[in-house]
Image (spheres, rainbow, N blue to C red):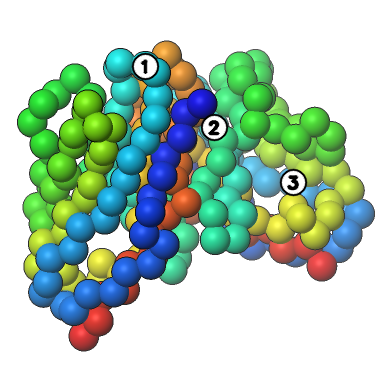
Amino acid sequence: NAGVMQNPRHLVRRRGQEARLRCSPMKGHSHVYWYRQLPEEGLKFMVYLQKENIIDESGMPKERFSAEFPKEGPSILRIQQVVRGDSAAYFCASSPVGQGQSEQYFGPGTRLTVT
Amino acid sequence: AQTVTQSQPEMSVQEAETVTLSCTYDTSENNYYLFWYKQPPSRQMILVIRQEAYKQQNATENRFSVNFQKAAKSFSLKISDSQLGDTAMYFCAFITNRDDKIIFGKGTRLHILP
């Protein structure tokens, strides 16, 4: 059973460009979470999605950031008009059920560098 | 507010020694899960150990064990017979039964010296 997949592993964008980060959950998992890790910090929750629904986006910045988890295909975290402060590692996690009832399995992360 | 505090930003110990990483947390919930994650230079988040808050018995996983003090909201990690491969960032974290987000501390950078 493959683990959580994220791609790309490394992404370099110039200021003002768009960044698209993809996450494929583990087989059988319908709950996806995105976390951001700034340099020298712990992970911070951004958004929780189920298929075709955003359940909790309390950690998402109000502007430029969006997330989706379509019926088919991976979850996408999209950052428009990136700025240097968006440089971070972005982790996706998945679980078979939600609300803290089961463990979240983390992917390897995408390291975004904004130049 | 739900928070996790790791008071040791960085630690170094000799190989084969025992080391304890401290963690305190704050939540008003009674049912929750506590975790220690290891993040090596590869940046992969690896679950080291997990503790259910309703269980009084401390969790153990080979050389890793915890000291869970629920009343004090303390959750320390002990690594016995430390190995060079234990060098990593270690994050303490928790999630409540009613929530969907894991709350992480800022981490402790652990160096195991040969």
* Labels 1 and 3 in the same subunit: no
Front disc: 2 or 1: 1
* Type of amino acid under label 2: Tyr
User: x, y (%) of residue A106?
Assistant: 44, 43
* Labels 2 and 1 in the same subunit: no
Front disc: 3 or 2: 2
Which residue: 26% across, 38% down? B74
The Cα–Cα distance between marks 1 and 3, rounded to whole angstroms, is 36 Å
Are the residues flagged by discs 1 and 3 in contact, CB closer than 8 Å? no
* Residue, far right: A16
Question: Of residues A1 and B22, which is closer to you in this image?
Answer: B22
Q: Residues within 10 Å of mark 2 (few under 14, many from 20)?
A: many
Location of residue B86 (image quadrant):
bottom left
What element does badge 3 sit on?
strand
User: x, y (%) of residue B113?
Assistant: 25, 81
| Quadrant of the image containing the C terminus of chain B | bottom left
Location of mark 1 (residue): B29
Location of residue A57 (image quadrant):
top right
Which residue: 61% across, 20% down? A56
What element does badge 1 sit on?
loop
- Numbered mark located on residue A20 in the image: 3
Q: Residues within 10 Å of mark 1 (few under 14, many from 20)?
A: few
The answer to whether any part of residue B111 appears in the image is yes
